Each structure stands twice: as C-alpha cells, then as structure tokens.
Amino acid sequence: MNNFIEIINLKKVFNLSSNNKLLLFKNLNFNIPRNSITSIIGPSGCGKSTLLNILGLLDSNFGGKYFFDSISINKINNKKLNKIRNQKIGFVHQFFHLIPELSVVENIILPALVQKDKISDIIKDADNLLKVFEIFDKKNMKPNKLSGGEQQRVAIARSLINKPDLILADEMTGNLDEKTSDEIINFFLNFVANHNISLIYVTHNQRYADMAETQYKLENKNLVLK
Ligand SMILES: Nc1ncnc2c1ncn2[C@@H]1O[C@H](COP(=O)(O)OP(=O)(O)O)[C@@H](O)[C@H]1O
Ligand SMILES: [Mg+2]
C-alpha cells in the first residue's frame, strides 16, 4: 500500500431511529499520497465533517476499509487508535475549540503532554510555533482576549505541536472575515507545503478549494475529483 491514506468502499450510515437511517457515503474511495494538500467542498449536511471524523480516527463506526500509513485501522484496538490520532494527526476547527481557562501557550502544549517528551522541549517547540505564527506576545493571555484570527493561529499551532503527518481542517476560515481568512489560508498552506505534512481541508469557499493540489467535491454520497 503506497498511499498515505487509503479508503476503500467506505459506507457510513447514521441510525436516526429504529426505522430511519441516514446513508451518507456508499462505496466511497479516497486516497492521498504523503505531503499532499487536498481540499473538499460540498453543500452543508452532505457529510464533510463526518468524513473528517472518520479520517481523524474519531469515528470507527463505518463500513469499508481504511489504511492509515499502511496500518489497517479496522484491525487495531482503541489504545493504538488513540496513539496514532494523538501523535500523527492534528485537527483545526471552525470555532477554534480552545480551552478558555488555559493560556495561549498552555492550549498549544496540551496535546503534547500525554507524550513522554521533556516539558522544556515541548515549551521550546511551542515558543517556535508562537513566533512563526506571530503570536508570541500573546503567549500568556487567555484565548478570549485574542481576535478570531489570532485564536485560529493558536489552534493551528496546537495542531502542529506533535509534529503530525496529517492535518484535518474543518472550515477553518468559516468564522473569520475575508481578509483574515485569506491571511490564515495563505500562511497555513505555505507552512504545510514546507513541513512534510499532508493537509485535508474542508471549505465552503471555492477560491480556497482551488488552492489545493487535489480538489474533491462531496456529492451524491461520494467524493468526485474536480
Ligand atoms: N452523530 C450523528 N448522528 C446522527 N446524524 C448525524 C450525526 N452527525 C451528523 N449527522 C447528520 O449527518 C449529516 C451530515 O453531517 P455533517 O457531516 O456534519 O455534514 P457537513 O459537515 O457536510 O455539513 C447531517 O444530516 C447531520 O445531521
Ligand atoms: Mg461540517
């Protein structure tokens, strides 16, 4: 298996009630190589977030096969699943999902604390990210004192702290004004391209979707190459 991510005949059904099922994907096939940038666009409710949850190992209740870096996700236990998710996958969300009680730097280092690295090394990595993302002067502030764009940069730094191989971004600019969105997307795509990371991002914005090397549309319960 040469692909970094390989999904074969994915099927996803939500059982809404005993006689009401929602079929989201049927025979969906998807693969990406390492170090690639992929966009997914599609109407609201078509299953974009559900697909990212599956890709991000947050939802293992699906039909079909999923290989992550040649590891069969269908066959491994929860402990291994959690380890892969924590060490190899970063997440960026529309509403940032920062913890309000923690400072900026505490939010960024949080995903790294379950690993056994020295805390001083983790903080050094966080400081580097804070500088790269131009929020070093906000390091000890609480997230609610920051602008939306700054909060998203904190969330992006957090997604990078464990040096992931894959980042999944769900409408990361959906809650930002156009100018800030443009800055964030340009900066982030550039960063990812220069750091051997694969990025899969969902967006409503055709202009942003067009910036990816590979562009998919989610329609008729399937992913279609643009
Ligand atoms: N946990 C769930 N249980 C039942 N239905 C769900 C669940 N999560 C999402 N859905 C439904 O699945 C569909 C796709 O949702 P979602 O993946 O969030 O779409 P998108 O991100 O493309 O807007 C929606 O109709 C939504 O209501
Ligand atoms: Mg969504």
Image (cartoon, grey):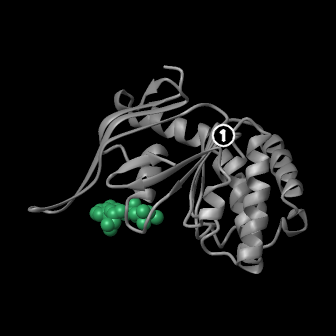
Q: Does the image show residue 96?
A: yes
Q: Check the image and report above or below for 175 versus 36.
A: below
Residue at position x 65%, y 44% from top?
213
Farthest front residue?
A: 226
How many marks do you count on the picture? Answer: 1
Q: Disc 1 residue type? A: Pro
- Residue 208 is situated, as x and y percent measured from the top left of the image, at 65, 60
- Residue 129 is situated, as x and y percent measured from the top left of the image, at 82, 52
Residue at position x 79%, y 65% from top?
183
> For this rendering, which residue is in front, 113 or 166?
166
- Residue 90 is situated, as x and y percent measured from the top left of the image, at 61, 48
**On the image, which quarter does residue 50 sit in?**
bottom left
**On the image, which quarter does residue 27 sit in?**
top left
Q: Does the image show residue 142?
A: no
Q: Could you say whether the residue bearing mark 1 is in a helix, strand or loop?
A: loop
> For this rendering, which residue is in front, 55 or 7?
7
Residue marked by disc 1: 164
Question: Where in the image, quadrant-wise, is ligand 1 located?
Answer: bottom left
> For this rendering, which residue is in front, 137 or 114?
137
Residue at position x 71%, y 75% from top?
178
Q: Is mark 1 within 8 Å of ligand 2?
A: no
- Residue 5 is situated, as x and y percent measured from the top left of the image, at 51, 33
Residue at position x 48%, y 19% from top?
1
